[in-house]
Image: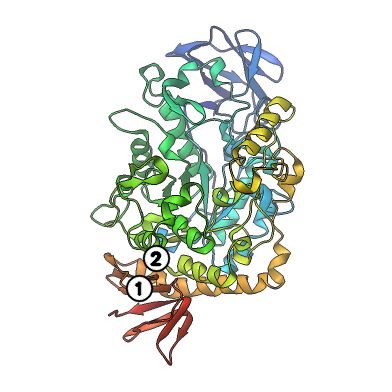
Amino acid sequence: MRRAHAMRFGSEAAEDGVRFALWAPTAEDVTLVIDGTDHPIPEAGEGWRVATVPGVKAGARYGFRIDGDLVVPDPASRFQPEDVSGLSEVIDPAAFDWTDTDWKGRPWEEAVVYEVHVGAATPEGTYAGLEQRLDDLIDLGITAIELLPLADFKGTRNWGYDGVLPYAPDSTYGRPDELKRLIDTAHAKGLMVLIDCVYNHFGPAGNYLHSYAKTFFTERHQTPWGAGINFDGKESGRVVRDYFIENALYWLEEYHFDGIRFDAVHAILDDSDKHFLAELAETIRKTLPDRHVHLILENEANQASWLERDGSAKPVLHTAQWADDLHHGWHVLLTGEEAGYYASFADRPVEHLARSLAEGFAYQGEPFPTLDNHPRGEPSAHLPPSAFVTFLQNHDQVGNRALGERLSHLADPSKLALARAGLLLAPQIPMLWMGEEWSASAPFLFFVDFAPDEELNKAVREGRRREFKSFAAFADDTSVIPDPTEEKTFTDSKIDWDEAEREPHRAVWADTRNLLQIRHQNVVPLTKTTYRGATTDLSVPGVIDVTWRYEGGSLRFVANFGDDDHAVDVSGGQMIWSQGYSRQSGQLAAWGGLFLLGDVK
């Protein structure tokens, strides 16, 4: 089976040649350059330049000469073999022969997500290297892998959030067909594949849009990265919105991804009557009605309105949101840390965690101390648990620490075991950060490569150390913070899969696998039935008692974070997991917990 996403942007196969299109509304003169030869590219109205050149084939290198001097890559390039400033390569998407003809995806309730950075996940740091690990993930109980952003970035190493060419999977990891082969193989094994996309900004190096499409950005909206992307300006017309909507469809159709995680959507600023996020989801749902397509948000604003369900309990727009509040509650309880945004959860961590487990968000419009008591969030108790992706760790929560420590470096193993069960057996959609399943020893550090731009490298290096200067641990000496621009910082972040065969890592891996077996056998069938709501009992200090009710039955989680044992009535329920519970005395020890299926008191 052949797949190609047709779009107005970039290069497209045409009869006996290739059609090239560029939106360049603020350029005076544009010339198409193909394999060193200039070709005219006439105006086609509303800022567009379009030309079809006979005889051009896949593999040709091309770019656009702007105002007689600067040659830039295609902003919709499908591949950049020589990095972001090099010429683009004409790709024939129909050249890859897919074998997953009947694949329609999997229901969201079955998802156990494994977040992965392709470059740091294997020694090879490639799509092919990751493909060799799929069987390991399946054996563990993973049903979906989520790839950090692939959009082409400057240099040879990056988290992916500095991408500047959203349609071009970075050449560091392999060619487009190797990415397609990874996805095709995953589908053959029953694995979903998700991709992380960044629609709120472009990276600091290799973005040439300002040289020919200044109206792509607007000073009316300011973001942490500068002028906002112009989603709502008359001067940008439909083009900016379409550029990103087509990008999402491109990944879903041409690469057959099963879903997209949209990064930091609170920074997508849009005053239109219909917000970009609404149009994006509506278009995807309308275009791909017969597939399981999962749209996930990262949204600090905790806007439950993006996650609403229809009468049949299906997502109207977006499928789920990363549940940061739930992570923060667990993290404070496990580590005692109170710096930064953890301060907003350190006052009542048990209560915040309980509300997050039962209702999704801990803050649903209440004043948020970290935001100078500005109200944060919207009511979310009516949403099913599947509207929330939960995690104890992710690339941000590990990598944004000065030393990139994993939670296993910070928390007591027995406490972490309780949290692991709380993550993997609760009805929300659980996500593991690569290596978490065996408590990998490798840190995950912040790394970039902007060479040969040493000024930018220096700015990143100094900015990183300045960021942590206010932390007591680094107030006197920031030199211990790894240099993000050094290659060693990247290689130190690679996980070692052989660790999973050695103790104490092997025991953690076995525990994770066991919990996921329990989840697939007991929890997932329940979550596929109609959700009836949740209740919490916080009558005993330090103890969480949460019950989720479904048409198919109930699931109850009791966890004791206090210093004293606590009597728990488990009559009428099927215990599927316990830690620190004595059946003889009916007592739940401190830092113990249990999950029950069936009737509850």
Q: Is residue 572 above or below residue 357?
A: below
**In this view of the protein, can residue 22 be seen by the observer?**
yes
**In this view of the protein, can residue 174 be seen by the observer?**
no
Please give the name of the residue rendered at 48% of the width and 13% of the height, measured from the top-left corner: 25
Q: Of label 2 and label 1, which has the lower sequence position?
A: 2
Answer left or right for 65 relative to 105. Answer: right
Q: Residues within 10 Å of mark 1 (few under 14, many from 20)?
A: many
Answer left or right for 184 relative to 266. Answer: right
Residue that lies at the very extreme toward the left in this rendered image:
311
Q: Position of residue 393 (x, y in %)?
A: 54, 56
Please give the name of the residue rendered at 73% of the width and 65% of the height, measured from the top-left corner: 498
Rendering quarter of residue 548? bottom left
Q: Position of residue 63 (x, y in %)?
A: 63, 20
Amino acid identity at mark 2:
Pro
In the rendered structure, find residue 353 and report the number of the disc placed on it.
none
Q: Residues within 10 Å of mark 2 (few under 14, many from 20)?
A: many
Separation (CA) of disc 2 from disc 1 = 8 Å
Q: Are marks 2 and 1 in contact (CB under 8 Å)?
A: yes
Answer left or right for 327 relative to 412. Answer: left
In the picture of the structure, the residue carrying the numbered disc 1 is 555
Q: Is residue 426 above or below residue 39?
A: below
Amino acid identity at mark 1:
Leu
In the picture of the structure, the residue carrying the numbered disc 2 is 427
- Quarter in which the C terminus is drawn: bottom left
